[in-house]
Image (spheres, rainbow, N blue to C red):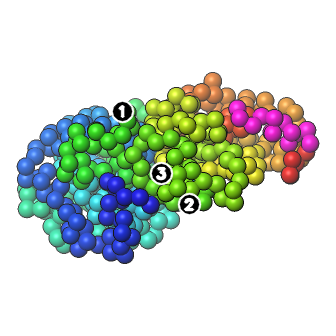
Amino acid sequence: MTAGILFARMEAHRADSHTLERYLATGGYDALRRALAEMTPDQVTAEVKASNLRGRGGAGFPCGVKWGFLAAATPRYLVVNADESEPGTFKDRQLLERDPHQLVEGAAIAAYALGVHQAFVYVRGEYARPARRLQRAVEEAYAAGFLGRGIAGSGFDLDLTVHLGAGAYICGEETALLNSLEGRRGEPRIRPPFPAVAGLYGRPTIVNNVETISNLPWIITHGGTAYDAIGPEGSRGTRLFSLSGHVRRPGNYEVVMGLTWRDLIFGEHLGGGMRAGRGLKAWIPGGASAPWLVPEHLDEPVTIDDAARLGTMLGSGAVIVMDETTDVVAAALSIVRFFAHESCGQCTPCREGTTWMQRVLERILRGAGRPADLDLLLDISDNISPGLRWPPAQTTICPLGPSATAPIVSIMRHFRPEVEARVTRGGAGG
Ligand SMILES: Cc1cc2nc3c(=O)[nH]c(=O)nc-3n(C[C@H](O)[C@H](O)[C@H](O)COP(=O)(O)O)c2cc1C
Ligand code: SF4
């Protein structure tokens, strides 16, 4: 873990970093007080726009631009997405557990800017401890006057509700999340209308990720321009990466974007290189949904736009590193099986295609694969996501189906001879 904007209070590994007392002692809620006392909502929005902060939930959409789409009708809502279910991602967990007041303050700043009087944080069902910490922080914030009526001595009212999900990955997708929050089945909605126009209970709604919102106190304290001065164009600010897999030092790291993948995976104070001195085979740069990168990409910059140029994405910031001993077919199966299990079943290409790809990969791993299976896998992928390009074309309501093709396309693109050998030589250990 490294310090910076988001992890500033956690650097000393203090056991009390989640408490109101510690938050106030380190300047906590000063940004909210300042926003309420000295700035209009439009001025707050202007700072967020000037920061060029891009969403950290996956798509990297500019936060200020999204806010600009919020329809004028009232009431309107803010929903913080703390579902964090993308395999390999565990950054929001740390923000919730170790610095929940930063999120509460960020949510209050956003609510003020957006004219919202009711905000929600939708927390992943399995995150019992982070949810408890957040709930406690919300109670402390109410007691101290940072939530409720006339917050921080202003005329602005805000209620914040913590809602626990029930453990479905699809509820991280913003419209499925809104359905779930309304007490309905967690299934994605057809867009348009987008949530900014008709979201929760059909009202204008902004959905932002935990990390996105946690940046706001810093942006208001230091100004949008100061944030915009950090990191390369298009990827401003610091960003959390959850490093996992075969690295020596797995964990969450806050870095300024623009470093290289080599820095991130091999850096002495970051990933620390490969475990047991093994060679690097591949890594998933942005959660299970992202197409993989391989050693020839090590010196590419870690930015949102460079990842897109390479046909992948930084997504949720989950970097899963695989060493030379990794069986790529087994790795792909593990991801495809996850998506098949989590598909909500509304769209035929996703519902049928993910399960079909799972069966073909299982067959190859059993040693019963057929030469035609390789093209079959690509054909099924092409039916879920025509053209097999990135960002994916969609035949489905949401991007989950197309995401399931990422591991297939990756192993065919980078490791086709290895997959072919599995088919010709048979299953395990091939
Ligand atoms: C299948 C699926 C799962 C998702 N899971 C999450 C999640 O767990 N957390 C999250 O913040 N965004 C998730 N997203 C992205 C959200 O739909 C949405 O874009 C995001 O919360 C917007 O926040 P941001 O603009 O701050 O990035 C997911 C998207 C899809 C398609
Ligand atoms: S793509 Fe899959 S998860 Fe998304 S709405 Fe369709 S069936 Fe559901």
Residue highlighted by disc 2: 249
How far, Cα to Cα, is label 1 from label 2? 29 Å
| Mark 2 residue type | Arg
Residue highlighted by disc 3: 241
- Under tag 2, what secondary structure? loop
In this picture, residue 296 sits left or right of residue 127? right
| Mark 1 residue type | Glu
| Mark 3 residue type | Phe
Residue found at the far top of this picture: 387
Residue 227, quarter of the rendered image: top left
Depicted 173 relative to depicted 245: above or below:
above
In the image, the segment drawn in magenta is 413-425
Q: Which mark is residue 290?
A: none
Asked if residue 29 lies in the magenta stretch, the reply is: no
The residue drawn where x is 47% and y is 65% is 127
The secondary structure that dominates the magenta segment is helix
Determine if residue 339 is in view: no
Residue 122 placement (x, y as % from top left)? 39, 57
Determine if residue 213 is in view: yes
